[in-house]
Amino acid sequence: MSVHPVSSLSTTVATLRHAGCVFAEDEAALLNEAARSPQELTALVERRAAGLPLEHVVGWAEFRGRRFGVDTGVFVPRRRTEFLVAQAVALAPRRAVVVDLCCGSGALGVALATEASAAELHACDVEPAAVRCARRNVGALGQVYEGDLFGPLPATLRGRVDVLLANVPYVPTDDVELLPAEARVHEPRVALDGGGDGLDVMRRVAAEAPGWLAPGASLLVETSERQRDAAVEVVGSAGLVPRVVVCEELYATVVIGTAAQ
């Protein structure tokens, strides 16, 4: 229910436009929905106009048709990454064992596990804030661990993982400062910075992945178009059979590495 009259909503749109929000009308409607009073709406608009990501302001992000809680300081799942999950769903066998590395809010793992009717979901992230957020989103659907990549996963998962999602950071270090302020200032650097060429974390994941994957299982990683050839080489050098799938509409590039049968 609207907490402000139409005239005030128009003022909100104007404020957001002045702050540089491209989709001011849509954002104004979401902020109006989230606010429980005119005073709270004013506070929410001020936070958004100051540059806080909309998802952090309203406390959720939409991903694959569902709303997931996203706390301040937690990486916001991107719409293009829905393509990564769609590829994973297509590959997941019945009652799959799913691992979501660098899980952030947990949105990717939950979407995959739900759509694929997974038997097990295991997610982990190195950021404590992300782990807290992911645990709320995952709930009873699976387990969320705090730690670096495969480090916190139970050893009993070795050789049993059917689908390994790794939405690793892939922005080259020198390019991080070129990102929009919403990401650069308000999201954790560890979720953005992929090292010198952007592929450092991907290399670490690919190197260990074969030891965790079941025969014929797959690792899926998102990358950029300009990094695709290097990413393919990274995945192939780890002993996985790589292939690339692209969604031009979402500007999404996914590298899939499949383990030997």
Image (cartoon, rainbow, N blue to C red):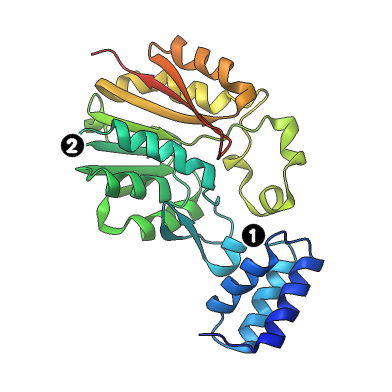
Q: Residue at x 58, y 63 (%)?
A: 56
Real-space Cα separation, disc 2 to disc 1, in angstroms = 37 Å
Using the rendered view, name the quadrant where residue 133 is placed. Answer: bottom left
Q: In this view, which residue lies farthest toward the right? A: 18
Hey, what amino acid is under mark 1? Answer: Pro
Residue under label 1: 53
Expressed as whole percent of the image width and height from the top left, the position of residue 154 reads: 27, 36
Hey, what amino acid is under mark 2? Answer: Arg
Q: Residue at x 61, y 26 (%)?
A: 225
> Pointer 2 and pointer 1: residues touching (CB < 8 Å)?
no
Expressed as whole percent of the image width and height from the top left, the position of residue 218 reads: 33, 25
Question: In the image, is residue 127 above or below residue 83?
Answer: below
Secondary structure under the numbered disc 1 in the rendered image: loop
Residue under label 2: 94
User: Looking at the rendered structure, which numbered label has been put on residue 2?
Assistant: none
Q: Residue at x 56, y 39 (%)?
A: 249
Quadrant the C terminus occupies: top left
Using the rendered view, name the quadrant where residue 210 is placed. Answer: top left
Question: In the image, is residue 39 above or below residue 199?
Answer: below
